[in-house]
Amino acid sequence: MNTPRVSVGMPVFNGARYIEEAVRSVLAQTYEDWELIISDNGSTDETVAIAKRLAAEDPRIRVFLHDRNRGAAWNYNQVFRLGRGEYFRWAPADDRMAPSYIEQCVAVLDIEPKAVLCYPRTRLIGAAGETIGEYEDRMQLQAQQPWRRATQFILRIGLCNAVLGLHRRETLLGTRLIQPFVGSDAVLLLESVLAGTVLEVPAPLFDRRVHPAASHEANRSREDLERWFNPSGRIRTRVPMGLRLLGGYLDAVFRAELPRWERLLAAVAVSACFGYRRLRNAVGRWRRRLTGEPLEPRGRWSGLVPPGSIEPF
């Protein structure tokens, strides 16, 4: 069997409502040299039956079944480890790709060797597929200095759509992947940003679904979210989410394969920008309280998988 150039990993747990639509969007890709890895985390609905039926239609689909739910972090990492391609993309089982998604992202990475990740613009859709609106990620980071890219990342990050773009597998192998805590998708994205540039395809080729059963909607408390990541792990809620996220960012910086002086510069830049954003948001919330303006609910674009990192800010 030939090794495909692109691996698409679809971790799923009880995703029967949308998984067929998600898989069909992979089958419709104009770029054909791919494999789809579906890893079921012990679903109790019709997910497995649907996945097996779709796999019977196309040999490029491989289905892996697990006897219990080991959590989102484990399953996201599992589909990556099972992949064989030069490029890799996580594909949540409730989202969709436009037919030219893979083709356009591969074309960018093929001609830009310093780029470690390419992602398209995002369109947010509702439970029935209706358009909510486009989301401006602003994650095209092309500065030559890693600390400058890190600074831009911290100042711009909201929803972590870019982490669902097309990665170089070699770069992901040098990261800690998805760790079992809220916001670890953003930490992984920072690890990639420190390793190379990030490019955007200027077209909305990714439909990200907002619906009641998704992670941030179904798991309202921090404890529930932590359990969603790792059901059998220790739930640690004493450390504030913002502090935990900053710790993850700094860990990413000091683990980066950079000269010591550049790691120190990046650490200072990340800390300063992180503090600035928290202060700016706190001032904004107090201003709205004083003027009587309604407060926007935290995580107003919630319901996305993996969890977006807008909450800790």
Image (cartoon, rainbow, N blue to C red):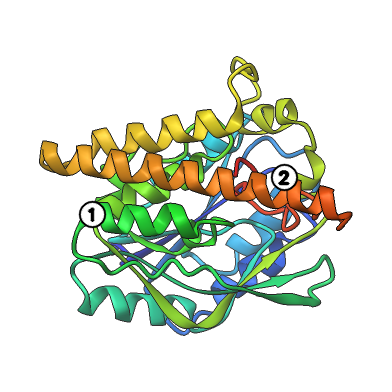
**Above or below for 292 versus 143:** above
Report x, y in % for residue 78: 46, 40
Tell me the quadrant of the picture where the C terminus can be found. top right
Asked whether, in this view, residue 116 is left or right of residue 43, the answer is: left
> Which of labels 2 and 1 is toward the front?
1
Kind of element beneath mark 1: helix
Q: Which residue is more in the foreground, 308 or 273?
A: 273
Report x, y in % for residue 226: 65, 28
Identify which amino acid the numbered label 1 is placed on: Pro
Q: Residue at x 63, y 49 (%)?
A: 281
Q: Residue at x 83, y 65 (%)?
A: 127
Q: Which residue is more in the foreground, 279 or 190?
A: 279
Asked whether, in this view, residue 168 is left or right of residue 132, the answer is: left
Asked whether, in this view, residue 64 is left or right of residue 130, the answer is: left
Kind of element beneath mark 2: helix
Q: Name the residue tied to disc 1.
A: 146
Q: Quadrant of residue 159?
A: bottom right
**Above or below for 53 versus 180:** below
Q: Residue at x 36, y 60 (%)?
A: 167
The residues bearing labels 2 and 1 have C-alpha atoms spaced at a distance of 32 Å
Identify which amino acid the numbered label 2 is placed on: Ser
Q: Name the residue tied to disc 2.
A: 215
Q: Residue at x 60, y 31 (%)?
A: 241
